Amino acid sequence: MGILSALFGSKPKVDLGELIANGAQIIDVRTPKEYKTGYIKGSKNIPLDKLNSQISKINKTKPVITCCASGMRSGSAKGILSKAGFNVHNGGGWTNLRKYS
């Protein structure tokens, strides 16, 4: 199970609430249809399949928290953004992450 946690960041090692309070960006990588059913106020919807082509829309100077429906796609997004040099954390499912906002 440790390998899965490392890959997908299912157990945050940072205080996500503190990151959000200090201006971290929340990137929701669900589809636009999923996003419209509910989202975290202030989050930005960039679907996972469009992340590489829209990466310039994300401020590289601020921490990033990725989220999706369950944490799987946001884990993939974390990997993509980490490789691109972002300070990024997997927030998991958006419904769990919204308690911090």
Image (tube, grey):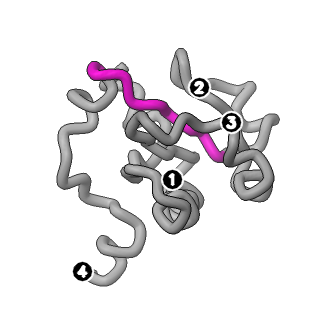
Spatial CA distance of label 2 from label 1 is 13 Å
Q: Which residue is mark 2?
A: 39
Q: Residue at x 33, y 60 (%)?
A: 10
Q: Earlier in the sequence, mark 1 or mark 3?
A: 3
Amino acid marked by disc 1: Ser
Q: Residue at x 41, y 27 (%)?
A: 98
Spatial CA distance of label 3 from label 4 is 32 Å
Q: Which residue is mark 4?
A: 2
Please tell me how crowded label 1 is: few (under 14), some (14-19), or many (20+) other residues with Cα within 10 Å. Answer: some
Amino acid marked by disc 2: Tyr
Which label was assigned to residue 7?
A: none
Secondary structure, mark 1, is loop
**Is residue 22 found inside the magenta-colored segment of the image?**
yes
Please tell me how crowded label 2 is: few (under 14), some (14-19), or many (20+) other residues with Cα within 10 Å. Answer: some
Question: Pointers 3 and 4 in contact (CB under 8 A)?
Answer: no
Counting labels gives 4
The spot of residue 39 in percent (x, y) is 59, 25
Could you tell me which quadrant the N terminus lies in?
bottom left
Q: Earlier in the sequence, mark 4 or mark 1?
A: 4
Question: Pointers 2 and 1 in contact (CB under 8 A)?
Answer: no
Please tell me how crowded label 4 is: few (under 14), some (14-19), or many (20+) other residues with Cα within 10 Å. Answer: few
Q: Which residue is mark 1?
A: 70
Q: Earlier in the sequence, mark 4 or mark 2?
A: 4
Spatial CA distance of label 1 from label 3 is 23 Å
Q: Which residue is mark 3?
A: 57
Q: Residue at x 50, y 41 (%)?
A: 60
Report the magenta residues as a range: 21-29
The spot of residue 85 in percent (x, y) is 47, 58
Amino acid marked by disc 4: Gly
Question: Pointers 1 and 3 in contact (CB under 8 A)?
Answer: no
Q: Residue at x 37, y 19 (%)?
A: 101
